[in-house]
Amino acid sequence: DQQVKQNSPSLSVQEGRISILNCDYTNSMFDYFLWYKKYPAEGPTFLISISSIKDKNEDGRFTVFLNKSAKHLSLHIVPSQPGDSAVYFCAASAPGSWGKLQFGAGTQVVVTP
Amino acid sequence: EAGVVQSPRYKIIEKKQPVAFWCNPISGHNTLYWYLQNLGQGPELLIRYENEEAVDDSQLPKDRFSAERLKGVDSTLKIQPAELGDSAVYLCASSQRTGGVETQYFGPGTRLLVL
């Protein structure tokens, strides 16, 4: 049962433009959401997170938006840079789950010059 | 600060052979996780340790998989015997709760190929 879904397996965006990655979840108990970035042959790297008490969190070029009623979150990257080309994973955890993260399948982002 | 260290980075074995993976977490991180990542999918939790205690091993296939974290620092994940379907990337992560939230930091993973 996939509780976290990233329905777009890939995204191509031009350098300097905005990248928007989407993530949907089904478990209303999730209260903490994270985005990880993964380069080939490396482990996922923590990018940004958001608690369910907020609807937006910003860190430099990266902003995560949370819409609890729609069970949807998105990651905006502005402006996109070639070094942003990677696989991005959305993850979520619920209270009392011992920090267990449920991951989406990932979205491959390619930033073209 | 050193990140999560894993070894080996790559391993090729024949089916029915045993294999072991090693993980050294970030210094001071009491919580350690082992994840399995299949191609085209996100990581899936196998086991979580709080110090030396396995607090969640519900996803660990205990007929062939075992893990230990003796002394609450390094950890070893073992498969015996390996099957073809075990070919995947095995990720180790560690975390420390700060300000009520817990962020997991991942190692580079061990890519296993079972022939």
Image (spheres, coloured by chain):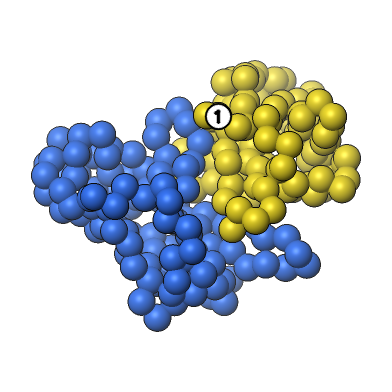
Q: Quadrant of residue A30?
A: top right
Which residue in the structure is indicated by mark 1? Answer: A2
Q: Quadrant of the C terminus of chain B?
A: top left
Q: Quadrant of the N terminus of chain B?
A: bottom right
For residue B74, above or below residue B81: below
Judging from the image, mark 1 belongs to the subunit labelled A
User: What type is the residue that disc 1 sits on?
Assistant: Gln
Q: Residue at x 38, y 60 (%)?
A: B6
Q: Secondary structure at mark 1?
A: loop
Residue A34 in view: no
Q: Quadrant of residue B21?
A: bottom left
Chain ID, yellow in image: A
In front here: A88 or B74?
B74
Residue B49 in view: yes
In front here: A38 or A16?
A38
Q: Position of residue A83 (x, y in %)?
A: 63, 37
Count residues near mark 1 (Cα–Cα under 10 Å), then give few for <14, some for 14-19, many for 20+. few
Q: Position of residue A74 (x, y in %)?
A: 76, 31
Q: Residue at x 13, y 40 (%)?
A: B15
Q: Position of residue B2 (x, y in %)?
A: 53, 69
Q: Residue at x 59, y 58 (%)?
A: A98
For residue B67, above or below residue B90: below
For residue A74, above or below residue B60: above
Q: How many marks?
A: 1
| Left or right of A76 in this view: A85 | left
Q: Position of residue B73 (x, y in %)?
A: 44, 75
Q: What colour do you see for chain B? A: blue
